[in-house]
Amino acid sequence: MAKNMQPIAKRCKALGISPTVMGYSKKETKRNPGGQMRKKKSEYAIQLNEKQKVKFVYGILEKQFHMYYEKASAMPGKTGENLLTLVERRLDNVVYRLGFAMTRREARQLVNHAHFTVNGQKVNIPSYLVRVGDVIEVKEGSRSAACFKRLTAEDAPMVNVPQWLERDKNALKGTVAKMPAREDIDMPIEEHLIVELYSK
């Protein structure tokens, strides 16, 4: 299975985003600290940068991302907002947003290893799109794993769960309360630039 293995800190610096968006609070790069960047970017470069930013944050490769764009453009409403809503609904992102994983990369791996169920059914596809009312839960046989036991301990990390999701901390369970809205996506992104890029 293809996956993005680019260095986090280096790529974040190149795209102009904070590693905290990726779930990393202490990552930074010392490479080329005083590097000279081109001050003036072309319109195409700016649009491409926005697309690469979303692809990198959510861990999506080009073929699948273009498929999301095609799907978003066929939906009613603004294509850019539809696109962000689709990638936000990915199961690996939902697992991360619920606080069951420290990063989206870790969430993707946990989903691949079948540690989660959706409505009681095992799902091991990171790109699975959740719907309103779906219940995402850590599988019974996986709850004794160290990565999940710490989530119910007294010193469990605090998680800022978005409004469209509800989490039952003690049960290691979360529910999709509603579809994510544009304001629920806290990443600094100008989605209209992605639409303009694909519209050419």
Image (cartoon, helix red, strand yellow):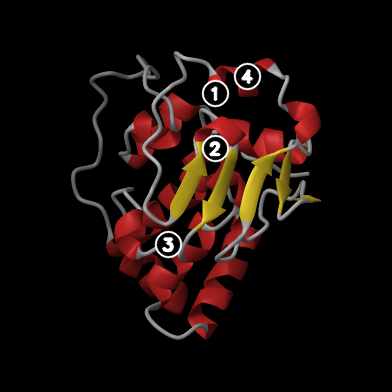
Q: How crowded is the residue under tag 4: few (<14 C-alpha within 10 Å), some, or many (20+)?
A: few
* Residue drawn at point x = 77 percent, y = 46 percent: 124
Which residue sits at x=33%, y=48%? 187
Disc 2 marks which residue? 104
Percent of width and height locating residue 86: 52, 64
Res. 124 mark? none
Give the quadrant of residue 33: top left
Residue at label 4?
149
For the residues labelled 4 and 1, say whether their Cβ atoms are less than 8 Å apart: yes
Labelled disc at residue 151: 1
Disc 2 to disc 3, C-alpha distance = 17 Å
Is residue 19 or residue 89 the one in the foreground?
A: 89
Label 3, residues with CA under 10 Å away: few <14, some 14-19, many ≥20: many
Quarter where residue 146 is shown: top right
Look at label 2 and name its amino acid: Arg
Secondary structure of the residue carrying tag 1 is: helix
Are there few (<14), some (14-19), or many (20+) residues within 10 Å of tag 1?
many
- First in sequence: mark 2 vs mark 1: 2
Query: Which residue is drawn at the image coordinates 73% and 46% (left, top)?
Result: 117
- The residue that mark 3 highlights is 180
Element assignment for label 3: loop
Q: Is residue 190 visible?
A: no
Q: Nearer the viewer, mark 3 or mark 4?
A: 4
- The CA distance from mark 4 to mark 1 is 5 Å
Q: Is residue 47 left or right of residue 148?
A: left
The answer to whether residue 124 is above or below residue 45 is: above
Q: Inspect the image, locate mark 3, and give the three-letter code of the amino acid beneath it.
A: Pro
Q: Residue extending furthest left?
A: 39
Q: Answer whether labels 3 and 1 touch (C-beta < 8 Å).
A: no
**Is residue 55 visible to the viewer in this orientation of the structure?**
yes
Quarter in which the N terminus is drawn: top right
The x and y percentages for residue 110 are: 69, 34
